[in-house]
Image (cartoon, rainbow, N blue to C red):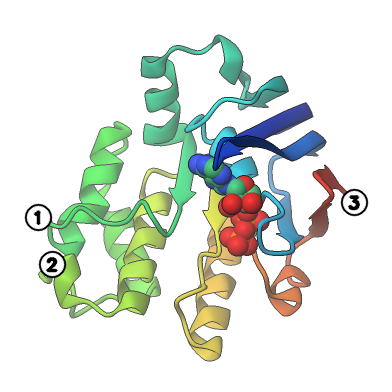
Amino acid sequence: MLLNIENVEKSHVSGGSRVAVLRGVSLSLEAGETVALTGESGSGKSTCLHLCAGLDRPDAGRIVVVGCDLARADDATLAGLRRGTVGLIFQQFNLIPSLTVRANLAFQARLSGRDDPDWCGELAMRLGLEGLHDRYPEQLSGGQQQRVAIGRALAARPALILADEPTGNLDEATGDAVLDLMLELVAESGAGLLMVTHSPRLAGRLGRRVRLTGGRLA
Ligand SMILES: Nc1ncnc2c1ncn2[C@@H]1O[C@H](COP(=O)(O)OP(=O)(O)OP(=O)(O)O)[C@@H](O)[C@H]1O
């Protein structure tokens, strides 16, 4: 199993009071599975993804990512997991500003120890980034940056991809094309995908759909 979330609870403190966001969330994902995580704004989708990436810790419950029990992992193990095993496509974890598009892709691949210039070149081509190789992130549109962020996440050939609205910055046609490509690459690599989306249309294109409501998954 790629991802196993068992009875996870998480609350955030805001304005001095504690708000329970996740109240016993359980979900598992097998290799090759694609799951859409939906729910109203504020329902806890990003919180859930951050916990799965080990960027935050649950108050209760257990999360196992590719055999690694996150509660028992130290910071170095969590960092190692994010370098190669898990690919993150989060809006707030964007590109490295001082590196070109080509270098942003290569950097992630090198970090994971899977440096493969041919694969990075193929990703860039399939994401429509040819011609932008030597540009820096600030010289790209929001949608182009998002496509580089997707390429960067895939460059290390992760076993699990966690994506928070990965096509949120793109127009409908480009978003569809990018999702097509993500699903194609996920299928080719046998990776799993857990993707947050607000769009029922995009959610419908994934293998399974779960909805966060009242702190639980339905
Ligand atoms: N670091 C934090 N500190 C305090 N409250 C937080 C924090 N992060 C999230 N929250 C609160 O927890 C709740 C869930 O937030 P989260 O971002 O997980 O929801 P979401 O479903 O991803 O929302 P959206 O669809 O709008 O992105 C919200 O009420 C939010 O205000």
Residue at left offset 42%, top offset 34%:
82
Which residue matches tag 3?
Answer: 218
Which callout, 3 or 1, points to the residue nearer the camera? 3
Give the numbered dot on residue 136: 2
Name the element at disc 2: loop
Residue 76 left/right relative to 199? left
Residue 160 appears in the figure: no
| Residue drawn where x is 46% and y is 45% of the image | 87
Determine which of the numbered discs, if any, sits on residue 98 in the image: 1
Q: Position of residue 8 (x, y in %)?
A: 75, 29
**Tag 1: amino acid:** Ser
Gap between marks 3 and 1 measured at Cα:
42 Å
Q: Position of residue 113 (x, y in %)?
A: 29, 31
- The crowd level at tag 2 (other Cα within 10 Å; few <14, some 14-19, many 20+) is some
Asked whether 75 or 117 is in front, the reply is 75
Q: Is residue 145 above or below residue 187?
A: below
